[in-house]
Amino acid sequence: MKKSMLLGTTLILIFAILLSACGKDSNNQASVSPGSSNSAVSGEASTVKSEPFTISIGINGGSNQLKLAQNKGWFEEEFAKINGKVEISDFQSGPQAIESIAAKRLDVTTLVDGGVITALAGKVDLKLTSFLSTGLKGINYIIVPKGSDVKELADLKGKQIALAKGTTNHVFFVKALKSVGLKESDVNIVNLLIPDAQPAFESGQLDAWVTADPFAYQEVNKNGATIIGSGESLNIASPVFTAFRADFTKEHPEAIEAYLRVVQKAVDYEKANYDEALKTYAELKKQDVALVKVLADNYGSQNEVIPDDVVTELQASADLLLELGFLKEKIDVSKIVDNSFIQNK
C-alpha cells in the first residue's frame, strides 16, 4: 500500500516537471521565432536581433527626407534594433545609382519613373516598395536661354536639346514632343549629364535643356532662361518611388520595413515642423531657404502604398519607350511593385 502511494506520488512529480519544461521550451521558441516582429500590428519594430548585416542607402538627387533622417541619426537608431549597420552614399542622378544597384554596391535609393524603366531595360532587378511623390512639379522642365527664338514646343524641331538619356527627363521629353506631334528624330538630342549640360547651356551651345530643379529655378531666376514646358504645364507626372534591390528584399525583409519607418518619420517631422525642416534642408544642402521652400512645396513628400493608377501610368511610359525603340522588349512593371512592406511598416 505504502509502495503504491510512493510510486503514484513520484509519477505525479515527474509529470509536473515535464509539463513545466515543455512550457519553458514553448515560451523560448516563441521569443526567438523568425519573423516574430509585431510591427504589422503595433507599428513598432521588434527588438529581437537577427544576424548582423549592412544596408547601403543611396541618396539620389539630394532627397530632403533622407538627408534629414541621416542628419538626425534615425537610420542608425532604427537599424540598431535589428542588428543592422548603415552606409549612406550620395548620387547626383538615377543612372549612377542604378549602376551601383546592378553591381550590388547599393541596396536602396529613390528613383523616378524614367530611372525605374531604364533599370528594368538593363535587367536590373528592383522592387518598388513605396510611393513618394507624384512628380508633377519640380522634376521636369524644358528651358531655353534668354533671348531665344524658341517660344513653344513646336519650335524645337531641328534644335539641339540636352538631356540625360534613360532618365525621367528623357521619358518626359518624349511625351512632351508627342503632345505637339513631334518625335525624337525631329530634334537633335545631346546626351549630357548635369555637370556638362549646365555650362553648355549657359555658354549658348544648346537651344534647350531638359532638367529639374534646382537647376531650372537657378537658370530662370539668375540667367533669364524661359520655361516652355513642364510636368505641371503639360500635366505629365513623373512618380517617385522607393526602389530596393530585389535580392535584398528577400534576404532582409525586416530591413525594408525598418527603412520605410524611418522615411515615414522624416515625412511626418517635415509636416509637423515645416519651417524648421526647411532651415535644416537649407543648411544640409547649402542652398538658399527660398529655393529649398520652392523645391519642398513642389515635391509634396509622402510615403504611401503605390496606387494602381500610378502603376498603370508607369506601364504606359514603358510601352511608349518600347514603341520608340528605347526598350528592346516589353516590360511588365506590375511584377516589381510590392506594397506589402509599406502596409506592414
Image: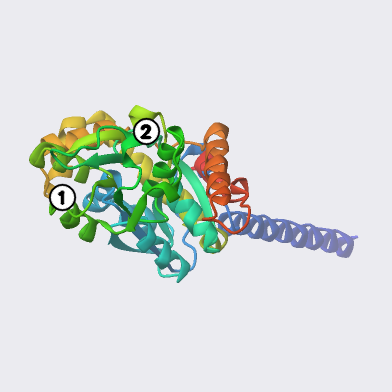
As rendered, which of 65 and 136 lies closer to the eye? 136
The numbered dot on residue 136 is: 2
Residue 234: which disc?
A: none
Q: Secondary structure at mark 1?
A: helix
Label 1 amino acid?
Leu
Q: What is the crowding at mark 1: few (fewer than 14 residues within 10 Å), some, or many (at least 20)? A: some
Q: Give, as a three-letter code, the residue at label 2.
A: Leu
Q: Is residue 275 above or below residue 29?
A: above
Assess whether mark 1 and mark 2 are in contact (beta carbons under 8 angstroms). Answer: no
Say if 242 sits above or below 234 in the image. Answer: below
Residue 306 screen position, x and y as percent = 51, 38
Residue 132: in sight, yes or no?
A: no
Foreground: 265 or 278? 278
> Which quadrant of the figure contains the N terminus?
bottom right
Residue drawn at point x = 29 percent, y = 47 percent: 63
Q: Secondary structure at mark 2?
A: loop
Q: Which residue is mark 1?
A: 284
Along the viewing direction, whichever of 84 and 250 lies nearer the viewer: 250
- Name the residue at 79% across, 57% down: 12
Residue 345 as seen in the image, left or right of residue 218: right
- Which of the two discs, 2 and 1, labels the residue nearer the N terminus? 2
Q: Residue at x 67, y 61 (%)?
A: 21
